[in-house]
Amino acid sequence: MILDGRTRTALERVAADHALSTAQTDALARYVGLLLGWRRSNVTGLTDPVAVVETLIGDSLALLAVPQLRERSRGVLADLGAGAGIPGIPLAVALPEVGMTLVESVARKCVFLEAAVAAAGLTGRTTVACSRSERYAAEGAPGREAHDVVLARAVARLAVLVELAAPLLATGGVLLASKTRAALDVESAAAAAAAARCGLSPESPVPLPASPLDDAVCSVFRKTGATPPWIPRREGVAGKRPLGR
């Protein structure tokens, strides 16, 4: 789908806020056009094209303000529970030297993600892992300890994200989880307790002033120790019985 003038203008404004090139803006335009064309397949709940740009693309690119991400601009990243490719695809466009894996368990969304990777010109450095994160991160699985950064955007409580992300991270790698300040205040204690059992250490959260979401922050956890081989637990267990509760 070709973007109308109003939507293209909104996208160019967001891209300019983050100093993206014309080629990068065009790549995002192709991705947004595909996303809008798939609205009936429920890959996103948003229906207004400008809202898709400002909320999804804008919120994704807001993570470029996080120093721990900038430090790994040539690293290997994973987007956990990628869904429609947010924030992984916009960040892969904005950071042309990263490798990105989009981890998603829903087959229909994986089909969309494969098409989106091609549309955005990311083939060769962005892959889709159509798998539960527990399987992708298990002992001996290809994702275990293979990533410098794991991204997560409000897919679960923070303690759950810590357990799912920890085995994916190489030593020194970071989990970056977008949350509202209110959610972080509620979830941080349990997440810190879970992190201590998973080999992660919390760092100071980073405000995201460019995010269109009110009071958005990025919660940061660094892998400072070994993740026990039994983590992650069986599929679904982390969500039902978080380690830090």
Image (spheres, rainbow, N blue to C red):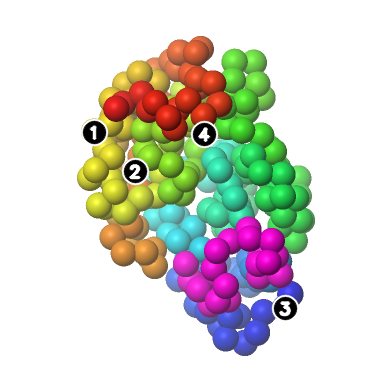
Residue tagged 1:
189
Residue tagged 3:
2
The residue closer to the viewer here, 157 or 91, is 157
Q: What separation in Å lies between label 2 and label 1 (alpha carbons)?
A: 12 Å
Which residue lies at the image location 69% right of the left edge and 61% below the top edge?
41
Local crowd size for mark 3, using a 10 Å CA cut-off: few (<14), some (14–19), many (≥20): few
Task: Name the amino acid type tagged 2.
Answer: Ser
Judge from the rendering whether residue 143 lies leftward or rightward of residue 177; answer left or right: right
Which of the 4 quarters of the picture holds residue 78? top right
Residue tagged 2:
219
Which element is circle 4 on? strand
The residue closer to the viewer here, 167 or 83, is 83
> N-terminal of the two: label 2 or label 4?
4
Residue tagged 4:
148
* Residue 149 picture location, percent across and down: 50, 37
Is label 2 in contact with label 1 (beta carbons under 8 Å)? no
Q: Which residues are magenta?
A: 35-55
